[in-house]
Image (tube, helix red, strand yellow):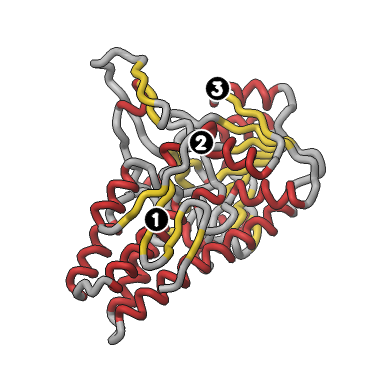
Amino acid sequence: MKNLLAASLKYQDNQLFVLDQYALPHQENWRLCQSVADMESLIKALKIRGAPLIGIGASLLVAHLASEQQSKAQLAQAIAQLRQARPTAVNLMHCMDKMSIALEQDDYELALQRCAEAIFEQDIALCNSMANFGNELVQEGDNILTHCNTGALATAGIGTALGVIYKAHQANKKIHVWVDETRPLLQGGRLTAYELERWQVPYTLICDNMAASLMAAGKVDKIFVGADRIAANGDFANKVGTYNLAVLAKHHGIEFYVVAPTTTLDIECENGAAIVIEQRDATEVTGVSGSFGQCQWAPSNAQVFNPAFDVTPAELVTGWVLDTGIYSPLDVHSGVLRFL
């Protein structure tokens, strides 16, 4: 398989490496990934994250295992196991389904490698397309609020929602970005701020509970967020806290956009109520950990509710920015997502 390089994923000299996102922004450690167990561990520890990137990484691993002369039965097992590694993010499932089809080819080793390469390269194109469409929505001097991390760290390309922001910055639109810290894992503070700083995009980091006061003061013009799964009716799952922003935006009359590739659509999922929401470890809420160590601030016996995502109803969305275009609520209500 040919060498492939992304911001947080690389396949070089027949080895797969993943940038440990949990150690960012202070340490840039590349982890060698050689097995399904390695990839599962990286996914569950959020060392590799972002719905598109997880699917891409898993695809590259399967192709690598094929090059290591694993049998068709072993590869089928690897695909099935990886497909279940992240229940909310549908991109992973779509990628593994493509790899399953490639596995049925006579020359399945070559087919798997070509499929993984195509998935990687397609994501770069999808990111560019989303960024170009989304840039049309950004006006000179806009103050844009975003949540979680949706940049190059989460994709093979320049990102989804953050890709739109990057494209607007490249167009010299003099934008400013409000970055939600994004509890409980602080992926906005750790990752989005890290990317915006490297891109030299003006930004201000805020606590999640400050967004309402900013909106009330007229300091937010637009909101762009990503998605881990979009249902057929336009409801979507994204990092927990997204629903809060959508409700606040509706109250304050602020445009609220979801930016995601068509690989995030799940037309078999009728609405948001059918989306499985991953529950995560209590320690992500009772304290914080990273390259800096670990800190516990809550009582050791505190009961914790820690869903990784929440679901935002379609009626709160101003528009869906996909790689195929910008879709209005009327478009989505008419069922257009089912045919993309």
In which quadrant is the N terminus drawn? bottom left
Residue 180, how many percent across, how many down? Answer: 57, 31
Residue type for callout 1: Phe
**In the current view of this chain or complex, which residue is farthest to the front?**
13
Query: Does 1 sit above or below residue 236?
Result: below
Please report contact status of discs 3 and 2: CB closer than 8 Å, yes or no. Answer: no
Please report contact status of discs 3 and 1: CB closer than 8 Å, yes or no. Answer: no
Mark 2–mark 1 Cα distance, whole angstroms, equals 18 Å
Left or right: where 217 falls relative to 233: right
- Give the mark nearer the N terminus: 3 vs 1: 1
- Give the mark nearer the N terminus: 3 vs 2: 2
Mark in the foreground, 3 or 2: 2
Mark 3–mark 1 Cα distance, whole angstroms, equals 36 Å
Q: Which mark is residue 25?
A: 2
The residue that disc 3 covers is 209
Residue type for callout 2: Pro
Q: Secondary structure at mark 3?
A: helix
Q: Measuring 36% from the left and 15% from the top, which residue is drawn there?
A: 297
Q: Measuring 36% from the left and 35% from the top, which residue is drawn there?
A: 307
Left or right: where 313 falls relative to 134: left
Q: Measuring 41% from the left and 48% from the top, which residue is drawn there?
A: 30
The residue that disc 1 covers is 17
Mark in the foreground, 3 or 1: 1
Residue 117, how many percent across, how many down? Answer: 45, 71
Residue 187, how many percent across, how many down? Answer: 49, 36
- The part of the image, by quadrant, that contains residue 139 is top right
Q: Secondary structure at mark 1?
A: strand
Left or right: where 68 falls relative to 43: left
